[in-house]
Amino acid sequence: MGNTASVGLVGLKSHKLRRLLAFVIDAAMVLSLLYIAYRLTGAPDYGAVKVSMDRLNAVQGTPEAQAAANVVFALFGRAYGYSLLIWFAYEVLSLLVLRGSTPGKLICRLQIISRKREGWSWACVPRGILRSVVKVAFLYFLQGIPFLVSCLSIFANPEYRAGVDFFAGTKVAER
């Protein structure tokens, strides 16, 4: 009896750990794409944001501080928006090409499916795209805090669904 409970707990942790590993792999790939995009186009330019922040620190308490702060916010907003656009494109293109998975999910043998279906089908594509739209909207408009809560919800329900999965009617399942 103790072995059965132990195996069940290992299975629970395994799915959560694989989702975490898939996220880390995908984040590393998106960071690589951001680096390539920066080298090719100069955007997103987080280096310029850092230089502007240093300038803001240097002029703190002077009449130029507000103008320097405006520059920091404008540069960061542009860089952040460009980063989210690349992340969104990465997720949507992966969903289409890898049939419901990102490269990280594929490596971890996971995929995004409709909550009401068994397995992936082309009917899952609109829900997968909606899932990515909601994720990016959480990150852009609400500064990521609801996204963090969404991610933490994986631990609070038996299907391991994130908040974005509830919005889109999806779940992450075994591939």
Image (spheres, helix red, strand yellow):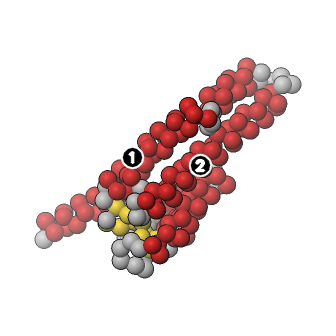
Label placed on residue 10? none
Label placed on residue 84? 2
Note whether residue 146 is visible.
Answer: no
The location of residue 73, given as percent across then percent down, is 73, 38
The location of residue 154, given as percent across then percent down, is 42, 62
Q: How many marks?
A: 2
Q: Check disc 2 and give the amino acid type.
A: Leu
Q: Check disc 1 and give the amino acid type.
A: Ile
- Quarter of the figure with residue 9: bottom left
Task: Between residue 114 and residue 10, name the one nearer to us.
Answer: 114
Query: Which residue is located at x 67 percent, y 55 percent?
Result: 141
Query: Which residue is located at x 56 percent, y 38 percent?
Result: 37
The location of residue 14, given as percent across then percent down, is 28, 58
The location of residue 106, given as percent across then percent down, is 34, 56
Quadrant of the snapshot with the C terminus: bottom left
Secondary-structure class at tag 2: helix
Q: Residues within 10 Å of mark 2 (few under 14, many from 20)?
A: some
- Quarter of the figure with residue 99: bottom left
Q: CA distance from mark 1 to mark 2?
A: 17 Å
Asked whether, in this view, residue 91 is left or right of residue 24, the answer is right
Q: Which residue is mark 1?
A: 25
Query: Which residue is located at x 69 percent, y 41 percent?
Result: 78
Query: Which residue is located at x 49 percent, y 69 percent?
Result: 125
Asked whether, in this view, residue 94 is left or right of residue 19, the answer is right
Secondary-structure class at tag 1: helix
Note whether residue 49 is visible.
Answer: yes
Quadrant of the snapshot with the N terminus: bottom left
Earlier-in-chain disc, 1 versus 2:
1
